[in-house]
Image (cartoon, rainbow, N blue to C red):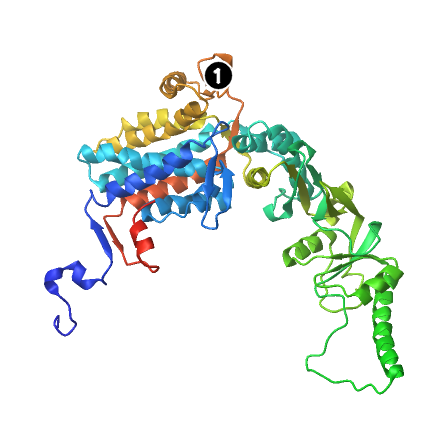
Amino acid sequence: MAQSMNLNAAAGLSGMLKSGHKHLSGPDATVVRNVEAARDLSRIVSTSLGPNGMNKLVVNHLERIIVTSDCAAIVRELEIEHPAAKMLSMASDAQDKECGDGTNLTVSFAGELLGQTEDLLRMGLHPSEIVEGYKKAGERLLELLPALAVETVDDPRDRNSLLSVVSPVLSAKQYGSEDVLAPLVVDACLGTMGSSSSSGRPSVNPDSVRVSKILGSNVAESRVIRGFVALRGSESTVTSAADAKITIFGCGIEASGTEAKGTVLMKNADDLKGYNKSEEKRMEETIKAIADTGCKVVLSGGTVSEMALHFIERYGLMCLRCPSKFDLRRLCTASGATALVRLGPATPDEMGHCDSVRVEEVGGRKVTIFSQDEAGGDGGCRLSTILLRASTSSTLADLERAIDDGVHAAKMACRDGRLVPGAGATEMELSVQIKNYADTCPGLDQYAVRAFARALEVVPRTLAENAGLDGSAVLAALGAAHANGNAMAGVDIEAAETGRNGVDEATAVRDLLNTKSNAFRLAIDAALTVLRVDQIIMSKPAGGGQKDARMGQV
């Protein structure tokens, strides 16, 4: 049978698989190489952890330059090919989509967990024993974490409570600008929650907080608009309207064309005049009917013909074009309108309303602002826009990523408002308690549990090193404080300037319990998945020799 299938039995696996494949097996070829790849990735992003984290300059395959300290953006743009490192990348992406913040914690902790396995393998532990120990330590960690909560955000509509949640997230990405950005994010989120009279716990939809970037000036000139901002001016000469009814067309405002080609025979000039007049008459009737509904603002998702614009001017309407269907949907959300697919007057239910529509010049660029009254409540606008200003495009993009993380933090606070100490205090306390737990474990997996506890120290150590402090000295002082029962002791990142020992005995930084729990869970799952691999079989990639040469590398 082997001969009929042209199988060379003596060649083993190489004879079974297609030419050009790669096959790695055994602990040295798989576990160790996977650990090295994951550890290399965590080293790249760990220097960006915390407020003093360094930026990375990444040039992607489109030669676009990205300058950021956001772990999710860095990992996404690196185009990782090594399968083990890609597991960490997928965990970071999942954390970013769910919680926004905590992506660097996920990758750094997973990389440190895998880095600890090298010593365990040298001691003679089998990967299955390491996996079992990590699983036990992970379960113990998730049991201990809720008990470390020190505060709870009972009412997310309370501005000061929401500020205490959002500020640490923004300071980790844009240290020094959090005092400007945090009020913007909080006000934008509060604008989408509705009135305090509504029943139930409020929620924040990240899609309801938009960012409009305008180059120029500085971040202090940024502001929040309760409504929508279109980055273009008016097509007509009317540039403002108050208490305006709005009609939105998903189609263009122009004479409809026939589906089939036709020929019109004109014998003299009167026929030509009559043909034009009939088209003008129909267009005028349409625009007049729209104006008679009380509409003041007309938006088109397509083109606006010169003839239509002429009659729009005649009836004193304000006209805008919005080519993006996504912006059209957001404007419908902001105004409560329904986009029409036919050209004609809208019914009262289909029309939207805005308290103010005006064209402003911001940074030398004309923008149209659709704003609603602050007292709109549940019947008003559920969309907020942050008009963001900065001097360079890369800074604008990085600020936008930080704001997105802040909005996700507000979303998570609405779901679960429990807060734990930040600045590495939670990780250090968990490390101390899991080390004590390791002493009660009788089997060989106690070594893996103890290695898990050491891996947790990566957060305070990295925070201290990124702040220019002696990581070992800070870690020793912090461990002593937690061993003495001070669970609130964290890393003081400003100790290099003040001359203190690097330990804040009662840190004021707070992190969301839900975000930290999710980050730990994803990191543990990613590390265990990598450790369970004992063989790597890769087929020959499409694309020729260039991709083949990079195969198996980060």
Quarter of image, res 459: top left
Residue name at image x 53 percent, y 33 percent: 173
- Nearest the viewer among 284 and 34 is 284
- Nearest the viewer among 538 and 379 is 538
- Nearest the viewer among 270 and 403 is 270
Side of 261 relative to 475 (left or right):
right
SS label for mark 1: helix
| Residue 390 screen position, x and y as percent | 63, 36
Quarter of image, res 187: top right
Q: Which residue is mark 1?
A: 495
Quadrant of the snapshot with the C terminus: top left
- View extreme (front): residue: 268
Residue name at image x 89 percent, y 61 percent: 314
| Residue 186 screen position, x and y as percent | 64, 36
Check the image and report above or below for 505 versus 354.
above
Instruction: Determine if residue 481 is in view.
Output: yes
- View extreme (left): residue: 10
| Residue 457 screen position, x and y as percent | 37, 27
Side of 228 relative to 13 (left or right):
right
How many circles with numbers are drawn on the protein? 1
Side of 70 relative to 247 (left or right):
left
- View extreme (top): residue: 499
In the rendered structure, which amino acid carries the disc numbered 1? Ala
Check the image and report above or below for 463 versus 81.
above
Instruction: Determine if residue 505 is in view.
Output: no
